[in-house]
Amino acid sequence: MKPILYLLFAALIISGCKKNHQDPQKHSVDVYISGTSVGDVDHWETIAGYWKNGVLTTVDDPAHKSEGYGITVKDNDVYVVGATFDPVKRIMVAAYWKNGAVNLLPGDGNHSSEATSIIINNSDIYIAGSSYLQGEEWERKDVSAVYWKNGERHVMGAFYNVGIEVKGNDIYSAGAMPYAYAKYRAIFWKNGIVTDLAPGQDAYVKDIYIQGNDVYVLGQVKTTAWYAGTYWKNGIPVQLLPDTASFFPRSIVAVNSDVYVGFDVSSGDHSIPYYWKNGNMIKVAESGYIAGLAVNGEDVYVCGILTNNIFPLAFYSVNGVAKPLDGAFLDLETQSKKYATTSGIVIVKH
């Protein structure tokens, strides 16, 4: 694994199921957050897991490297999606864990894959992810978007898959399709039909969300100097911030007429995490990254990484008040360094 801490943070923050599909009525809630923890960064052994109300539960064998990218909760069952390491083939294998029991998802058997988003529609389990047609372990090239329905693999096309949504008999996805060196097309996928959201422009997508008959896709579009934070509502673009801002979108949720976006803004040598509601920016912390966002009534929940500490901390916040998560600290007495990074958040009402 790469020895630079922030490279792993970036990789894990990019991925994952970002949102919560819940009725907006406010009740007492449980907060579930997916992510990855490292018991000791001197050895870089990562393990997939989730937090319930701030308490960490790991879901894979500590002897194997694994990463958690997304989460959902159905009835009393907790599902985490991600990837686990095959030490024989030396590849990462897409997987999901149900209440801690691992289920490997089929790939081509020779190349790495990962699961990044999960939706349960009635009794059907839909999981989105990507396969990488070259490279071992974390070397990921020649991407192919895939989804699994009840474990059956379907290839969607040559793009980075950011998520999956299901409405009736329709399956929706979105992602970034490479078309030149370091250039991408922002695409929307519905039942096998691909739509270019920003024709002729360098752009990419980070998230997808459906509310009623409206489809929201979150991403960025290259301007003269920067990538402008943008979401598309039914294909119509809405720019979030002036294109002078270095903006990194992470997650989008719509509730009735309100639109919420979690994002980071670059400021010198660090990033500042925010969420956006109908044009208003709310700062979450002085330094860090957003990974996921969920809304319950008037309460806005985000998860991510705080970087204004002795050691980066996994956190979640409610209405801008940040709270550290279990399993991320620097023990000054033993000098044991532990950290965790988050990828998605779900709110479950009682």
Image: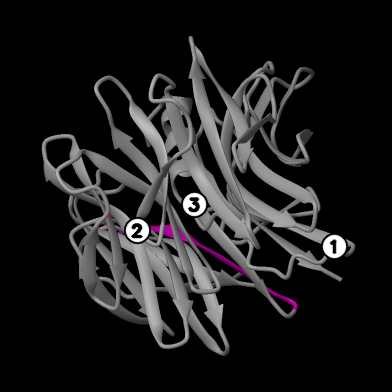
Residue shown at 27% from the left, 53% from the top: 197
Q: Which residues are magenta?
A: 76-91
- Disc number lying in front (3 or 2): 2
Q: Residue 117, how many percent across, how many down?
A: 47, 63
Residue type for callout 3 = Glu
Residue position marked by numbered label 2 in the rendering: 235
Q: Which residue: 60% across, 29% down?
A: 273
Find numbered disc 3 in the image and state the secondary structure of the residue it sits on.
strand
Q: Circle 3 is placed at which residue position?
A: 67
Residue type pointed to by label 2: Gly
For mark 1, give the secondary structure. Answer: loop
* Left or right: where 110 falls relative to 174: left
> Can the viewer see residue 39?
no
Q: Position of residue 342 (x, y in %)?
A: 59, 44
Q: Is residue 13 magenta?
A: no
Q: Is residue 3 above or below residue 75?
A: above
Badge 2 element = loop
For mark 1, what is the residue? Answer: 26
Across and down, in percent, residue 108 comes to 21, 71
Magenta run includes residue 84: yes
Amino acid type shown at disc 1: Lys
- Residue 133 x/y as whole percent: 17, 57
**Considering only order in the chain, which callout, 3 or 1, is on the residue closer to the N terminus?**
1
| Separation of residues labelled 2 and 1 (CA atoms) | 31 Å
Using a 10 Å C-alpha cutoff, classify the residue at mark 1 as few (fewer than 14 neighbours), some (14 to 19) or many (20 or more).
few
Q: Nearer the viewer, residue 239 or 340?
A: 239
